């Protein structure tokens, strides 16, 4: 029996409706969620991603700021702008679209974003919060993968999960999130020999290596859940993932398609992190005013 598709588009729509409701409550309390998006240069793909993020903000009732700069913007000027946004009370999340021009150090830029506004979850401090299982912002793609797995109703406790990939933005945080869900986790990567030895033991496989057909049907345990994070092109130029979808769907119990699986969830989890950031700010404000959480802090309101 073919695997059941995990529909990222449908789940994304459900979560965005929830986010819109939370944003409306925040706005009523005088705390409309705000996201600042910075684009340096004219990379075509980045322009599309940024446009989609700004549109998504509007769709759920966020305040958004889009700042576009020429590719010759100095690193110092970019860092100064980030510092200003760090101190802007109307902004709850800051996102600098990658890649940046070569003369700008991306690590320096990421670390300049206040941890409280690091809604991409990329900074060293955010990574540390994830490792220590402290409240913080989870990187959006692995966060979305977890939501996709949760949507199947599958209990990860005691199950074996294999993550293929060790990047700082997907592979490593994905493994940590699975670990937090009480899965037993194995991380595989480009230097792992006999990959199938590990994946055939897995109840859940997350493929995030950036190479098509990395995971084939003979490498999958019957009934496993397969999450495909990859974004590649096949010989015909069509979008595809890291998984041989046609073959693996005949073996797995659940599988994400490409497109329409993980992709839609990434921006959704960016919105989720931003609304959570705004909720934290409101909670602190209410605490300072001596009000119970959830009350409208504005004078003269019930």
Image (cartoon, rainbow, N blue to C red):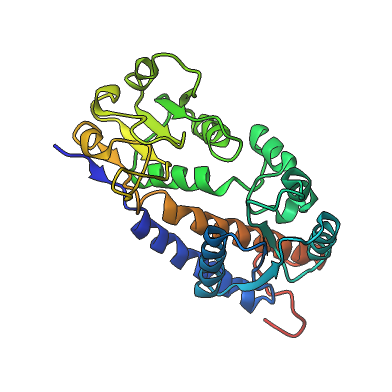
Count up the numbered dots.
Answer: 0
Q: Which quadrant would the C terminus be assigned to in this image?
A: bottom right
Q: Position of residue 106 (x, y in %)?
A: 72, 47
Q: Residue at x 39, y 42 (%)?
A: 149
Q: Position of residue 31 (x, y in %)?
A: 68, 72
Q: Residue at x 33, y 50 (%)?
A: 237
**Quadrant in which residue 35 is drawn:** bottom right
Q: Which quadrant would the N terminus be assigned to in this image?
A: top left
Taking the view exactly as shown, the residue that stands out farthest to the left is 1
Q: Position of residue 22 (x, y in %)?
A: 55, 67
Image height check: is 231 above or below 175?
below
**Quadrant in which residue 216 is drawn:** top left
Horizontally, residue 52 falls left or right of residue 219, namely right
Image height check: is 165 above or below 109?
above
Q: Position of residue 16 (x, y in %)?
A: 46, 64
Q: Residue at x 73, y 62 (%)?
A: 281
300 or 156: nearer the viewer: 156
Horizontally, residue 53 falls left or right of residue 163, namely right
Image height check: is 26 above or below 220?
below
């Amino acid at each position: 029996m073919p695997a059941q598709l995990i529909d990222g588009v449908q789940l994304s729509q459900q979560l965005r409706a929830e986010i819109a409701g939370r944003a409306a409550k925040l706005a009523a309390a005088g705390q409309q969620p705000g996201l600042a998006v910075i684009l340096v240069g004219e990379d075509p793909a980045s322009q599309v991603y940024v446009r989609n993020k700004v549109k998504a903000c509007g769709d759920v009732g966020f305040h958004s700021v889009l700042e576009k700069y020429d590719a010759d913007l100095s690193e110092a000027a970019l860092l100064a702008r980030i510092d200003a946004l760090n101190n802007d009370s109307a902004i709850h999340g800051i996102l600098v679209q990658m890649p940046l021009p070569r003369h700008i150090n991306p690590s320096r830029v990421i670390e300049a974003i206040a941890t409280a506004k690091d809604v991409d979850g990329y900074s060293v401090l955010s990574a540390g919060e994830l490792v220590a299982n402290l409240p913080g912002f989870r990187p959006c793609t692995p966060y979305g993968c977890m939501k996709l797995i949760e949507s199947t109703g599958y209990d990860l406790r005691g199950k074996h999960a294999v993550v293929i990939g060790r990047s700082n933005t997907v592979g490593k945080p994905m493994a940590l999130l699975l670990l937090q869900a009480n899965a037993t986790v194995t991380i595989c990567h480009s230097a792992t020999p006999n990959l199938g030895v590990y994946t055939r033991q897995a109840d859940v496989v997350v493929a995030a290596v950036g190479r098509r057909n990395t995971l084939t049907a003979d490498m999958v345990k019957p009934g496993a859940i397969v999450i495909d994070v990859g974004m590649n092109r096949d010989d015909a130029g069509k979008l595809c993932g890291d998984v041989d979808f046609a073959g693996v769907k005949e073996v797995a119990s659940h599988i994400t398609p490409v497109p329409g699986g993980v992709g839609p969830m990434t921006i959704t989890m960016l919105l989720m992190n931003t609304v959570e950031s705004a909720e934290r700010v409101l909670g602190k404000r209410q605490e300072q005013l001596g009000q119970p959480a959830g009350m409208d802090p504005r004078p003269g309101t019930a």
